[in-house]
Image: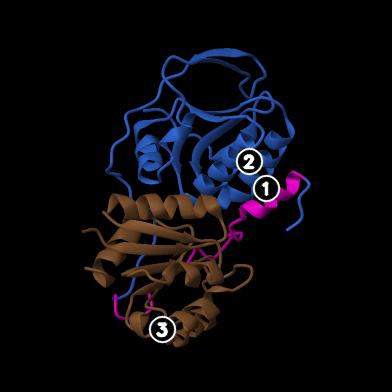
Amino acid sequence: MDPEPISRVEMCAPPHLALHGTVDIFLARELLELAKRALDGEGDVRVDCRELERLDTSALQILLALQRQLAEHSRALQLLLVNEQVGAFLGFGGATGLLRESEAKLELAPASGEPALIEGETAGVDAERSDPLDGGWSDADDLCERERPDSGVVPLPDESELTRVDGEDE
Amino acid sequence: MSKTALVVDDSPSLRQMVVFTLKQAGFSVLEGGNGREGIDQLRGQRVELIITDLNMPVMDGFEFVKHVRTLPSYKFTPILILTTESQAAKRQEGKAAGATGWLVKPFNPEQVLQVVSKVCP
């Protein structure tokens, strides 16, 4: 059994990114910073997802915001080598447009700095997801409550922060 | 005929995710980028569910909910607040404003649908 990848996000042959493990609100700040740097670059932004096991909506929100702002400059965001679980999540979040088509080949530099030729392929997207994220609701006739984890939680960065990279004020 | 929901959030990408989630459940979805736009969307419409953010420009979520509750047609319409805020005081304020439910971002699309099915069967 392969060891679980350490969850992290990294710039990989700028402006390309690589996501590893579980990328959720605990890594949202780092992902946002990398998204800003990717915006500063040129050309399409490709995200190596071969070691990505799970996304949550805070991470997806950042990716969608990045996609939106890249598109304003005729640039694209593409997720590569997405596993079935993440693909299903993207489908549930309406973000299948981020998936790169299977014919793609991409040169990315892995963390080691050695270039690697990767066959791009995307997993099938199912409507069902197998691992619900944490959270819960109270009875429908009362306020619904969900506590976030106690430690290390950063407020979800909003895309206006991403926008400011483009030199626009809120 | 499908039910109609209104999603109010100043983040287009967040709205995109919520709208897609609701459309998968068969809703027609209207959108607003702040409370004022949300109120504008309600005019002349029959909306069965409202999901709103709290922190928005022009008109925030609390003001939006309070205003919606003054409209006779929307006195009992389910209103869910979807926000990064999680403090008990904020939740209480939301309840006092007239909200039906509270969900903290990042949200789980499946759980949103579960709750929607409860408050808007």
Q: Does the magenta stretch include residue A152?
A: yes
Residue interval drawn in magenta: A140-166
Q: Name the residue under label 2.
A: A69
Q: Is residue A74 magenta?
A: no
Q: Mark 3 points at which residue?
A: B71
State the separation of the CA atoms marked 3 and 2.
Answer: 37 Å
For the point 53% across and 40% down, the residue is A7
Q: Is residue A17 above or below residue B106?
A: above
Give the side of residue A159 with respect to residue B53, left or right: right
For the point 27% across and 54% down, the residue is B25
Point out which mark residue A162 bears.
1
What chain does badge 2 belong to? A
Which element is circle 1 on?
helix
Which chain can be seen in blue?
A: A
In the rendering, what colour is chain B?
brown
Counting from the top left corner in percent of width and height, residue A132 is at 33, 52
